[in-house]
Amino acid sequence: MKHRISPQNVTAGMYICGFGGGWLDHPFWVKRFEVKPRHLPRLADSAVPFVIIDDERGAGLAEGLPDCASEAGASGPDAKRIGGKELIRPRRSNKSFRPASWSSTPARNDRRAEAKRLLARSLEVTRTTFANIRTGKPIRMAEVSDVVEDIVGSTVRCPRALLEVLRLKQKDEYTYLHSVAVCTLMINVARQLGKSEAEIFDYGLAGLFHDLGKMCVDQAILDKPGSLDDAEFDEVRSHPVHGYDILARTPGVPAIALDVCRHHHERPDGKGYPSGLSGAELTEAARLGAICDVYDALTSDRAYKDAWTPSKAISAMWSWEGQFDRELLFAFMKSVGVFPEGLVVELDGDRLGLVLAPRVEGQRSRVLVFYCTASRSPIVAKDATTSGKRDSVTIIAPADPQAHGIAPELCNETHLRGAEWARQPVAALAG
């Protein structure tokens, strides 16, 4: 049985399956969830005229609580009967009403505005959390978890909006916004890898907490525009251990967050810190934390450098032998839609392509399709994008041209666009 009740009458343990009013009226990114104690203040302060609960999936109405309109049903000005069944019709709030069917595809401006609101709240919570650590106060896990839940929801509903807004972050907010950005990137790539919702949340929390130990480092060192001396560099290199110690004393922190905090500066080749771990000693989460941390650092304005474009950052990261797990780095590329220029890739439809530089900053990757793997023959080179729209291509994996009988030196844009490419006999492709 479903019931419509006032948001002020919602209690922990109830299962919400809908809200009255427009999709912007309620303060959550998802419309179906079990109510936790931390949700109650936001519900009570929200602009929604009513909440729909399902007492078969959660706690029911308390005795004496009014049921404004149940599916079994009371009629009234906000109910409507269709085909013999009485349905709830949302009241109009003082904000503009949107049909529920619009909520899954909000206009770009609405998505961006919602992302900005979420970013502002995430920044406030992160700044407060880090400030509390500097003064020895405990982490308020309920507040942090609430923010991570909302970021998880935003990557489902509007997977690009928050990442686009985060790219505009300012130098003076880098420490805090970097944590929010890495949280978002970790959630994004965890979903790309098919993790469960519980794991996705833990990856997000790990991203938000990964640099917590920097609050134990002198702020002047963190903000220094020039090169660090040996003593300063040693102090910065201590932050993973400091962060781990803080989180280890905090109840409710998942193991993934502890692991990423301590090991996100380790490297598969053993040249990282603080423990010099390598190979199988590093968990998948720690390897992903390193990728997300470096990518956001490279694409951000810092006191000592200007931001790189996503394409430049990804190309550099792919070229750094031994620093990142290549398989996970490629999964990360797929999650952000950016691939290194010059990489030969396997495409859907039994084709190979060459990744080209984007024409404008922020554009999704361009690909030059040049070979059919089914017929093992060259084809007339054709431009395509990875936009996900009609006639776009899907990048599946990196490809070794030699495995297809193609000499690597032939895989350059000038040669592939030449009139002779598609007319070459297969035997000539080996160089």
Image (tube, rainbow, N blue to C red):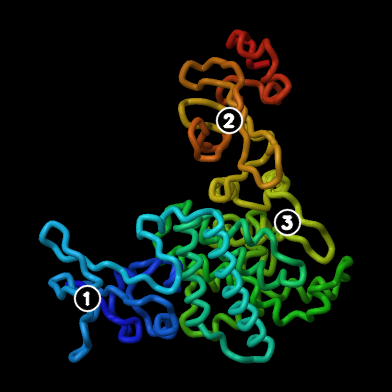
Question: Which residue is disc 3 drawn over?
Answer: 298
Badge 2, how many Cα within 10 Å: few under 14, some, many 20+? some
Given the current orientation, which residue lies at the most extreme front position? 77
Q: Are the residues tagged 3 and 2 within 8 Å (C-beta)?
A: no
Which residue lies at the image location 52% right of the left edge and 78% below the top edge? 144
Question: Which residue is disc 1 drawn over?
Answer: 3
Marking on residue 347 = none
For the residue marked with disc 1, what is the amino acid? His
What secondary structure is marked by label 2?
strand
Badge 3, how many Cα within 10 Å: few under 14, some, many 20+? many
Residue 318: x and y, percent? 67, 45
Q: Quadrant of the C terminus?
A: top right
Which of the pair 109/412 is nearer the observer?
109
Residue 96: x and y, percent? 44, 66
What secondary structure is marked by label 3?
helix
Q: Is residue 321 above or below residue 261?
A: above
Mark 3 against mark 2, which lies toward the viewer?
Answer: 2
Question: Which residue is disc 2 drawn over?
Answer: 384
For the residue marked with disc 3, what is the amino acid? Leu
Q: Which of the two discs, 1 and 3, labels the residue nearer the N terminus? A: 1
For the residue marked with disc 2, what is the amino acid? Ala
Dividing the picture into quarters, in which one does residue 23 lie?
bottom left
Q: How far apart are marks 3 and 2 (CA)?
A: 27 Å
Mark 1 against mark 2, which lies toward the viewer?
Answer: 1
Residue 296: x and y, percent? 67, 59
Residue 61 showing in the rendered view: yes
